[in-house]
Amino acid sequence: MKSFFRPSSIAVVGASPRRIGHQIMENLVYGYKGEIYPVNPNYSEIEGIRCFPSVEDIPQSVDLAIVLVPAPATPSVVEACARKGILRVMIQSAGFAEVGEEGRAIQDRCIAIAGGAGIRVWGPNCMGMVDVPRGQFLSFMSPNIYEDGLVPGRISLVVQSGMLSGVFLTEMSRQIIGIGKVCSIGNKSDVDECDLLTYLLEDDETDAVAFYLESMPRGRLFADIARRGAKPIVVLKGGRSEAGARAAMSHTSSLAGNSRLLDSVLQMSGVTLANDFNQMIDLAGTLAASPDVPANCRAAILTFSGGAGILTCDLLDRHQLRVADLSEKSREALRRIFPTWMPVANPVDLYPAVELHGRLGVYSGAIEIALDDANVDVVIVHYPVGLEKEAIDLAAMKKKADLAGKTLLFWIVGRQDAVRLFRQKAQILGIQVYGEISRAVDCLAAAARFQRRTAVGPADAGASTQSLGDLKQFFSQDTPNRIWDEYDSKRLFSGWNIQIAKEKVVSSLAEAKTAAQDFGFPIVLKGLLPGEIHKTESGLLRLGIGAQADLEAAYQEIEKKLGGRGRILLQQQVDISFELIAGFHRDDQFGPCVMFGLGGIFSELQADVVFALAPLKQPTALDLLGRIRGHKLLDGFRGMAPLNKELMAETLVNLGNLGTAYPQIEQIDINPVAVVGGSPVAVDATVILKPS
Amino acid sequence: MKSFFRPSSIAVVGASPRRIGHQIMENLVYGYKGEIYPVNPNYSEIEGIRCFPSVEDIPQSVDLAIVLVPAPATPSVVEACARKGILRVMIQSAGFAEVGEEGRAIQDRCIAIAGGAGIRVWGPNCMGMVDVPRGQFLSFMSPNIYEDGLVPGRISLVVQSGMLSGVFLTEMSRQIIGIGKVCSIGNKSDVDECDLLTYLLEDDETDAVAFYLESMPRGRLFADIARRGAKPIVVLKGGRSEAGARAAMSHTSSLAGNSRLLDSVLQMSGVTLANDFNQMIDLAGTLAASPDVPANCRAAILTFSGGAGILTCDLLDRHQLRVADLSEKSREALRRIFPTWMPVANPVDLYPAVELHGRLGVYSGAIEIALDDANVDVVIVHYPVGLEKEAIDLAAMKKKADLAGKTLLFWIVGRQDAVRLFRQKAQILGIQVYGEISRAVDCLAAAARFQRRTAVGPADAGASTQSLGDLKQFFSQDTPNRIWDEYDSKRLFSGWNIQIAKEKVVSSLAEAKTAAQDFGFPIVLKGLLPGEIHKTESGLLRLGIGAQADLEAAYQEIEKKLGGRGRILLQQQVDISFELIAGFHRDDQFGPCVMFGLGGIFSELQADVVFALAPLKQPTALDLLGRIRGHKLLDGFRGMAPLNKELMAETLVNLGNLGTAYPQIEQIDINPVAVVGGSPVAVDATVILKPS
């Protein structure tokens, strides 16, 4: 990747004295330090630089070719690059896969040629790459973007949508947010988000990486790289609403839609999710500046307004973050600057002290007191900027915060020019500044969660999978269906230490009665039909059969419903405290995954489920349990025994190993996983194979 | 209230040539059109205006006295005002109830004097009132706030916190948001949010009212006024986190904490809730500009970036808003400006058309097409401002949108100055502009909900309450406890048409056996202890007793646990589809309220409950049912019968009437309300009286 980011020489194929072919030349001349070779057979020089008819006419060696010619002409350009030995090609022109089949064919040809010659291709249909601190614009974007004054920084961006990269730069310039590299990857025919994540995690000029992505075809690889990386990663995924429309047979797979699986798996890999552009940038900035906020951080709030202080408490509370209990030493110190009538509390309302002493000493003094307080991890300062001489020595305060390992952040209000000036000063010092209190608190909460992730432990790359058995052995029927019935599905579990309810297939009423006697009442009777997974709705389920007479009636009813098809399963009725759901889903983008969530009515209503890559290890499975919104439920309620989390985690580990071990398996549902005396028991299950 | 907002003459008690006493004079001279009378015994003139020793020395009549003298001097000023016949007094000085008991005593004295003289008091401890369109600053706030250029508009604000009113003005000036009146009400010793809501709902210069409030002691009145008003109202309530800490005996009352009751009741009254300052202002602006967005509005998205278009769809989807299905006519018209290779879709990506034709015709053309489309209610335009000559004739587009009764809104990006310029133009025309897509969609969703509210129907002021009976008749015990046991509680329901499960108090095993025979197994046995409301945890509940032998064992166990106290209740076990919860709560701020929500595990986990003022009518109760997050559940699932909503609504109406009719009742819990074959049945209940 380095030749894309730091090329010693660049050929610009399609350079011209007009339009985008000129803009890119202008941009390169502006800040690129290496050799520039314009390529265009119609000109002998552009911007005073000698122009070549073809890359092959360039006498020197070339690191990178940037291609701006129309799509149909690109394959021959890539061929020329191959002959010239240029190993990095960045195609910025459009008209490829994004416009239809014809364009896709051209794109595929380029990639085939490149692949044969060992060339890496960036694009097509992209805006290239900008390195703000270097002033290096490998892009045809309009020069007025940098003329406006971009702020160099240490957040790097990867953006799938072309126009957006320009928007991001404009926004960050307007909001004075420091930025490192901006990579527009377009159709990502070869170089994609995984390549760039790998590079940027190693890049010592980048502290955090943010992605806007519309597709993640190598999602599993992305998650794996993210999990191994130490830097904060923020992802904004576009195109969430469509996914839900996809039909799926199992609960697990239908729950995987609507980006739920993607969200879970990325979060399990330590990725922070964003839901809008500016928020994404604010998150990345916060995480870059404050990657070490403790999970249960305690905030001191220094404010000029009681109301703003109260609102900050409300917002912290909503994120389960704490308002710090100031030490007696801090209280004493604050009392010395407060008017005598005013009690000291957190939020610390500085306005009366400012009225008494003026702003000058009060703000800095209070910040120092808060930073010195052992009960405080984060200092949130509400600051009305620019009403007079700056009252805070930002550099000194930031130094003090860094020494103490604490986070200092600002919510500011004020006039336009004063706000800009303060942001500029803060940006240089690496202090985060927010225009809304809720945004500040949201970002702080994300930083606290990021910290939590790193405590989870190492990746699961080495999670063991047992050796493959023969799937055939689990079929009790001659013509196996793609959708296994409940009994076969649970037989598959037997070798994998997944607890199931006591059950027996019965072929006569007499056999049923004997089995019921053995199991003890109450029992459950189910009619199993191949391919039928909704027993309740089909009237094939009888719960709570309390005596032989009831059994007889139920048996006859189900037998009638089945009409000679399928078979009848008799099951011991377990005493369910509450219901969970577990599953396995082989995802197009993320490969084998396990799902865990609340079952019963919950799964009907709001899908409180989470996913993790399989195979997974016990600590990851335990972590997963804690990630459902209703995790409180697992700790027991109304006197019920808590879930044995170790056992549940083992079940998920085993389910992941099982699903991974048989590539033929597409989906597994265990729904419900009944919690019986705290232990998870698979009461109903469905295995679904891939279409053959 | 009018003399506070449009006084013909003002006395400024505490006017001075320095500090705040001078700032207010400067502010009044700047834009106030009536007579100004400075009052200060130490000066003969201030700002060139004759100064009086006391209000009583002013020869002319005075509409309003603004008081800035120190707190201890205020009672005598109010006395002087009373003698002078000044009926409106605005005390802006601090040092009253907000600083402690001594201050509260001074405040109380002022109010007592004022009350005796028919004087209305605004404040104390406030920043007064600003009327931006009039340039009328009845406030000591720093003149540099308006020097910066406030934008006149038709949103009015009421702010409890003093400093915040200045912050709001600065922010709105910075963001170019038009503003009408800003009222800082401080300690609201007399004039409060209810008075101002009443006034501003009638004020023909105000289109929407936004409130930042830390307390709502007259919450019920506020809700009543809001419900009758036709204008959009936005409330940001500070101090939410504290309320939850309050201990409460019933589920209903504990669920009322954490602002849940306040949120519900305000929403039921058509109020839109905000969670941060800027968001509050954006909401108010949106609702003022677009109060008629249809509930299921269909949006056309015109964008310069495929990515931004996709993200907008995702965000609309999250709010259940729809992406419009463009008409064939629109598609045809768009095809004419699109490049031939490009398919027409919504989001409408205008970038290729702009590349082809330039921005000038494309944006306006596309907006017109979208506004003409009968399938479109809202046009969301993504617009990169100021790259060249303005491409959109905003005035013409706004006029067209108004004629069509449609909403036109913008997400813009661009350089600082271009953004400001565009916002200024849009503000004058009443077009909403947003800096973040998510904020635009959030506000649009709020506008769609606001519309939904107005469809709910008239207020419940006339909801009937039945005549009061004697509570005594429901006591079967000699020494009634404040917390009634389940049996007595349900006896109270009997006159109010609230369905209960079949049950009987039994005093011997023999009696229990006979009753069980009558009811039919399975049955439930409960030990009732006065004051004990957690039967499960206390081991006083036996469910699913299937036969006489089991009954005997259960009876003996419970009898033993009771140890001679309490009594035993035998109940028919109903076949529960799912559990709900209903309740009555007499609130300090909102008076009698009913609660409705999901029961069972749900109520443990996440409190999906809503509240409404009682008494209420059937349509309001039906509306309430639809407001829980899990309302989908009520429509039936897994083949279960849906809830009979008419019956459930009737139960809530009756519960509200019952609770309202007996002022001694503080709380009622019906937990659970079992849904049996679709009908609500009170299975367990507790009535709690007020402490005597």
Image (cartoon, coloured by chain):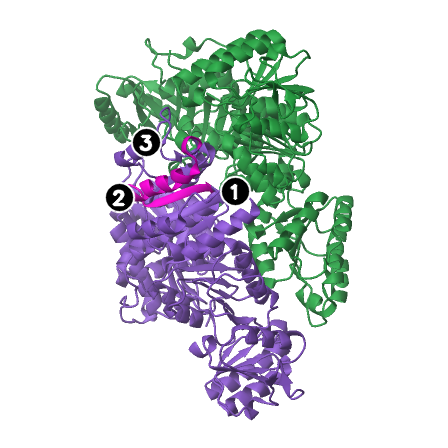
Chain colours: A green, B purple
Q: Secondary structure at mark 1?
A: helix
Q: Which residue matches tag 1?
A: A632
Q: Residue at x 56, y 49 (%)?
A: B417
Numbered mark located on residue A31 in the image? none
In the image, which is nearer the foreground, mark 1 or mark 3? 3
Q: Which residues are magenta?
A: B355-383
Look at the picture and state if B394 lies above or below B652. Answer: above
Q: Which mark is residue B677?
A: 2
Of A258 and B303, nearer the camera is B303
- Tag 1 near tag 3, CB within 8 Å: no
Residue type, mark 1 in image = Lys
Helix, strand or loop under label 3: helix
Q: Circle 1: is it few (<14), some (14-19), or many (20+) Cα within 10 Å?
A: some
Image coordinates of residue B262 in percent, x first then y, are 44, 60
Circle 3 sits on which residue? B336
Residue B296 picture quarter:
top left
In the image, A41: left or right of A106?
right
Q: Name the amino acid type tagged 3.
A: Arg
- Does residue B344 lie above or below A106 as drawn? below
Chain letter, disc 2 residue: B
Task: Check residue A294 for magenta coloring.
Answer: no
**Separation of disc 1 and disc 3 at Cα?**
57 Å
Q: Secondary structure at mark 2?
A: loop
Of the 4 image quadrants, the one containing the C terminus of chain B is: bottom left
Q: CA distance from mark 1 to mark 2?
A: 31 Å
Q: Quadrant of the N terminus of chain B?
A: bottom left
Using the image as rendered, state which of residue A651 and residue B229 is in the foreground: B229
Report the mark closest to the observer, 1 or 2: 1
**Marks 1, 2 in one chain:** no
Which amino acid type is marked by label 2? Gly
A450 sits left or right of B629 in the view: right
Chain letter of disc 3 in the image:
B
